[in-house]
Image (cartoon, helix red, strand yellow):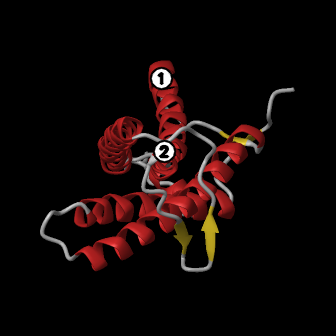
């Protein structure tokens, strides 16, 4: 059965959207810092553990967001969008969600295939088990490349997604951005009113 439509995002969807966005940007910055060659090895180990911890959290939240987007009410497209714009927005939405799941899974694969078998201490509370996959240096190098390519692809799409949201807000004056801010207020173009009788 087709899902019913909703006028706006619920608080859970909004919270997941912004939490995942902050986690993705933070993980990209952390990933850049921890791979610098001049970094102290002890600090590097800690940064790797924090990167993996927040990566697992991002994976969990992204998986929840993806499942909800497939099962909960679909939000109606903003008024005034053409067929191509609606399809593009729909495609971008699911592409970003898929990448939000795929990037941390690729990171999990790096840890799992590494011959070093360094455990992942999630927030120093629990050990995340490795995936049951063969270990080799070649596989580790391959998954490292996949992880980096997917991460930078995600960053590129996030910038495009953000630019599109700002375009809709400041140029198109519709509610694409404000709906994800938890506001039902709609910005509309000023029109000249006819004088009353």
Give residue 82's mark. Answer: 1
Quarter assignment of residue 46: bottom left
Instruction: From the viewer's side, name the closer residue of 47 and 117.
Output: 117
At x 59%, y 53%, the residue is: 130
Residue 184 shows up from this direction: no
- The quadrant in which the N terminus is found is top right
Q: In this view, does 39 lie above or below 109?
A: below
Instruction: From the viewer's side, name the closer residue of 14 and 179.
Output: 14
Q: Kindly identify which residue carries mark 2.
A: 113
Q: Is residue 163 above or below residue 4?
A: below
At x 68%, y 58%, the residue is: 10
Q: Is residue 108 above or below residue 139?
A: below
Q: Earlier in the sequence, mark 2 or mark 1?
A: 1
At x 31%, y 60%, the residue is: 31
Q: How far apart are marks 2 and 1 (CA)?
A: 46 Å
Q: Is residue 146 left or right of residue 53?
A: left
At x 18%, y 72%, the residue is: 39
Label 1 packing within 10 angstroms: few (<14), some (14-19), many (20+): few
SS under mark 2: helix
């Amino acid at each position: 059965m087709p899902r019913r439509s909703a006028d706006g995002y619920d608080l859970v969807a909004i919270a997941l959207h912004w939490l995942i966005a902050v986690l993705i940007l933070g993980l990209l910055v952390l990933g850049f810092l921890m791979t610098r060659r001049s970094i102290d090895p002890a600090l590097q180990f800690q940064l790797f553990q924090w990167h993996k911890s927040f990566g697992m959290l991002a994976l969990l939240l992204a998986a929840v967001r993806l499942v909800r987007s497939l099962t909960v009410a679909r939000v109606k497209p903003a008024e005034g969008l053409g067929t191509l714009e609606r399809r593009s927005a729909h495609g971008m939405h699911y592409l970003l969600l898929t990448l939000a799941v795929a990037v941390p899974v690729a990171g999990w694969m790096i840890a799992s295939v590494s011959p070093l078998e360094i455990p992942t201490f999630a927030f120093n509370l629990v050990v995340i088990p490795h995936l049951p996959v063969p270990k080799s240096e070649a596989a580790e190098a391959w998954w490292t490349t996949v992880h980096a390519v997917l991460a930078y692809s995600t960053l590129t799409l996030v910038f495009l997604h953000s630019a599109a949201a700002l375009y809709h807000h400041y140029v198109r004056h519709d509610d694409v951005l404000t709906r994800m801010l938890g506001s039902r207020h709609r910005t509309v173009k000023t029109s000249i009113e006819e004088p009353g009788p």
